[in-house]
Image (cartoon, grey):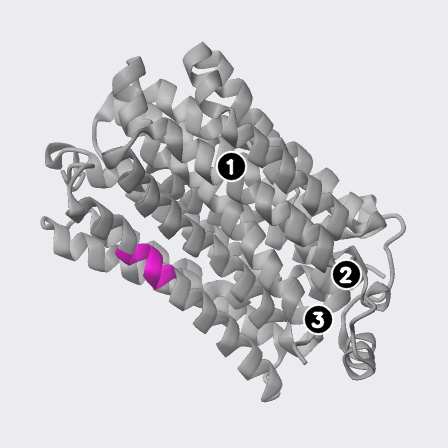
Amino acid sequence: MFPERYKLIFMSFLAVFVCYIDRVNISVAIIPMQQQFGWSESQVGLILGSFYFGYVFTMMIGGYLADRFGGKVVLAYGVLLWSIFTVVTPLFAYSGFWFLILIRVLMGLGEGITFPSWHALYARWIPFNERTRAIAFTNSGMSFGTVFGYVVTAIIIQYYSWELVFYLFGVLGIIWFFFWQKKIYAYPNNNPLITKNELKLIAEEAPAKEAAQSLPISKLLTNKPFLAIVIATFCHNWTFFTFISYLPKYVNSPVSSGGLGVELESSLFIIMVLIPSIISVLSLLLGGYLADSFIKKGVKIIIVRKLANSLGFFGAALCLFLIVFQENIFNMIILLCITNLFSGIGAGGFGVNHADLGPKYTGSLYGIAGSIGMIAAIISPIITGFLLESLKSWSIIFQLCSLVLVIGGTTYLFFASAEKQFE
């Protein structure tokens, strides 16, 4: 019989997948939309960054609600809301620039609950020795969604229109909502289909077995291991969301500005955005497997966390720094792929450290760290847009991302912990 926790993992993966196809479709659609509506690079940056204004707000609230009332209902209605907002995006775009900004903020409000919700569910459903792999697999929905979003959006635009992208992608989330409501339960002991053996395994090994009460905020704000997660999250998000937002434009930008100069309509465009994303999927799965394997073999958890995180941050920083000195497309794409390889290996680092510090507060810890980290997601696309408009060069973008990763990796290396901090 298929374990019930695996159904939760798969459906959570699909939620992340839908989250990312709805998030990144505009990164490709913005190219014809910019031409049609006559937006400047700064306006494009505002459009891409506005999503995260809403995201920051509900990420923290979503973690709290998921810890208190269960992640099932919180995630369900978040997906439903952002899917509806996706469907009506073209209507708002034609209504004017600020109406598009508004619907992107509302989409962010819906998507902000995604990650803290399923992290809260996993803290109550997933045995400790499976946790890193489960999180890595679920997070691979980001890369699968990015690949699907980039490629399918480009194809739909080429043969139909950018408006159809939002209609079709939004409907997928609404379909997911009905299956989630029917198949998933907030707590293992509420599931009538779970076997006694699986329930016993979860009860013995899942990090959290109860709903959280109140989070010790004063201790949280002075806790160095938690602040190390916060800073690492911010620095990771700066680079990650810069490229989530701007990779298609980087591939499409003229060679004179440091871009790759590949036309949106060409098959080469799809290949250029596809290959790094595929590497990201595979490396995320590999990173999660390796981290769990080392822990099972008796390596100290903190050593695994710091080693994985350091490889992810410092390896990616080096590759991004070297891209500036390359003169041909092949070398640039190879370095982008290696960047994603290192980032995936880092899956066993800061991104799974929350449940080490406070198992029953996992959703809240993830939500608070993620909300602060999402400030980077707001400002990095906006700053990138202004830099591209004023300097007309991609080199400074890569160098800035490299520096930010070094800061995040160094902070985590010195201050991270795997000891429980919050009872």
Residue 200 as seen in the image, left or right of residue 262 = right
When asked about the image quadrant of residue 293, the answer is: bottom right
Question: Residue at 52% of width from left, 58% of height from top?
Answer: 139
Query: Would you name the residue on which mark 2 appears?
Result: 358
x, y percentage for residue 331?
15, 56
- Res. 183 in view: yes
Where does the magenta region start and end? 275-280
Q: Identify the amino acid type marked 2.
A: Gly
Is 277 colored magenta in this rendering? yes
Q: Which circle marks residue 170 in the picture?
A: 1
Q: Which residue is mark 3?
A: 4
Say if residue 366 shows up in the picture.
Answer: no
Alpha carbon separation for disc pair 3 and 2:
25 Å
To which quarter of the image does residue 412 belong?
bottom right
Work out which residue is located at the far top of the displayed protein and give it: 96
Q: Nearer the viewer, residue 130 or 271?
A: 271
| Residue lying at 39% horizontally and 34% vertically, measured from the top left | 165
Principal secondary structure, stretch drawn in magenta: helix
Question: Quick one: SS at disc 1?
Answer: helix
Instruction: Give the amino acid at mark 1.
Output: Gly
| Residue 67 horizontal side relative to residue 311, left or right | right
Residue 395 position in % (x across, y down): 23, 39
Earlier in the chain: of badge 3 and badge 1, it is: 3
How far, Cα to Cα, is label 2 from label 1? 35 Å
Q: Nearer the viewer, mark 3 or mark 2?
A: 3
Q: Are marks 2 and 1 in contact (CB under 8 Å)?
A: no
Q: Earlier in the sequence, mark 2 or mark 1?
A: 1
Q: Position of residue 325 (x, y in %)?
A: 16, 49
SS label for mark 2? loop
Callout 3, which amino acid? Glu
Residue drawn at 64 percent across, 34 percent down:
81
